């Protein structure tokens, strides 16, 4: 693979038997998953690939994606790398929908399917977006909604300079989430859906609807916590990922 800023690999493994691609939630970055490498035994030969979209980290100054199509088009440029070894796609919230749309695109190209798609705290992407969009709210109202979502760290919310810098990124990601609705395209791979026990944003109907999108099977499991349980229960999330790897 040519060197690029899209994929960050904390621990490159030349003999990796499986690659795990990790997609961030709205406003998130590859840093969400950086420390996950410590939770995977090196002997498993699993290579973690953290997806770094524009507007974050070393790509801070690059133009932001405004549509799902734009996001996935960039990923598909690296389709041969993504599918060169057995792989799993994992995404949290918006990241789950990005992973699904990528999987659909790879299928239309006739490329190898993922071994699994894991959608974490992510409503099925073919359902209409039922929440009132927030990306176009006035400044103060937008910040108020961010506080309610409880996904933006307090140290950012209380740092007005940093928050102002991140608002364009957050608005762009929430715009993608609000305007994207997938076509019903069942995937060949199984899908595991992870839901938060206290997640008031993603109801059971939105989680169960992922069953429409797999020709294999869909399993639903719950993790203690709200919508951002991934920030507090990452060890349990990794345990769930390892459980599906054990299947093959």
Image: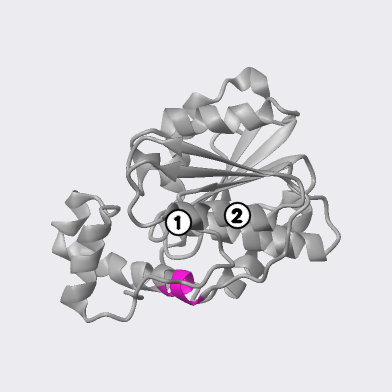
Residue pictured at 55% horizontal, 25% vertical = 40
Q: Quadrant of the C terminus?
A: top right
Answer few, some or many: residues within 10 Å of disc 2's Cα (few below 14, many 20 plus, some between 14 and 19). Answer: many
Extent of the magenta region? 175-179
Disc 1 element:
helix
Residue pictured at 73% horizontal, 59% vertical = 186
137 left or right of 219?
Answer: left
Q: Is residue 190 visible?
A: yes
Q: Nearer the viewer, residue 99 or 226?
A: 226
Q: Position of residue 241 (x, y in %)?
A: 58, 33
Q: Earlier in the sequence, mark 1 or mark 2?
A: 1
Q: Position of residue 190 (x, y in %)?
A: 70, 44
- Above or below, 210 against 84 in this view is below
Q: Nearer the viewer, residue 179 or 23?
A: 179
Check the image and name the residue furthest to the front. Answer: 205
In the picture of the structure, the residue carrying the numbered disc 1 is 58
Q: Alpha carbon of mark 1 to alpha carbon of mark 2: how far?
A: 34 Å
- Above or below, 29 against 9 in this view is below
CB atoms of marks 1 and 2 within 8 Å: no
- Is residue 226 in the magenta section? no
Q: Nearer the viewer, residue 3 or 98?
A: 98
Residue pictured at 44% horizontal, 73% vertical = 178
* Residue 210 badge: 2
Q: Depth-wise, is mark 1 or mark 2 nearer the camera?
A: 2
Q: Position of residue 106 (x, y in %)?
A: 76, 60
């Amino acid at each position: 693979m040519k060197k690029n800023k899209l994929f960050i690999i904390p621990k490159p493994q030349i003999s990796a038997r499986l690659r795990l691609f990790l997609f961030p939630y709205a406003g998130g970055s590859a840093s969400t998953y950086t420390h996950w490498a410590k939770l995977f035994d090196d002997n498993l030969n699993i290579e973690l690939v953290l997806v770094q979209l524009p507007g974050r980290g070393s790509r801070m100054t690059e133009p932001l994606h405004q549509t799902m199509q734009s996001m996935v088009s960039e990923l598909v440029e690296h389709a041969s790398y993504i599918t060169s070894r057995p792989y799993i796609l994992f995404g949290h919230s918006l990241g789950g929908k990005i992973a699904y749309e990528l999987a659909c695109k790879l299928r239309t190209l006739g490329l190898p399917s993922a071994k699994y798609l894991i959608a974490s705290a992510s409503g099925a992407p073919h359902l209409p977006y039922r929440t009132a969009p927030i990306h176009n709210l006035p400044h103060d109202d937008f910040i108020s909604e961010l506080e309610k979502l409880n996904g933006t760290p307090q140290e950012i919310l209380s740092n007005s300079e940093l928050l102002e810098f991140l608002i364009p990124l957050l608005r762009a990601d929430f715009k993608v989430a609000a305007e994207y609705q997938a076509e019903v395209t069942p995937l060949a791979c199984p899908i595991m859906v992870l839901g938060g026990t206290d997640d008031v944003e993603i109801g059971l109907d939105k989680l169960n609807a992922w069953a429409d999108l797999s020709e294999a099977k869909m399993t639903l499991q719950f993790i203690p916590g709200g919508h951002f349980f991934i920030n507090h229960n990452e060890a349990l999330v990794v345990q769930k990922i390892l459980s599906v790897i054990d299947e093959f």
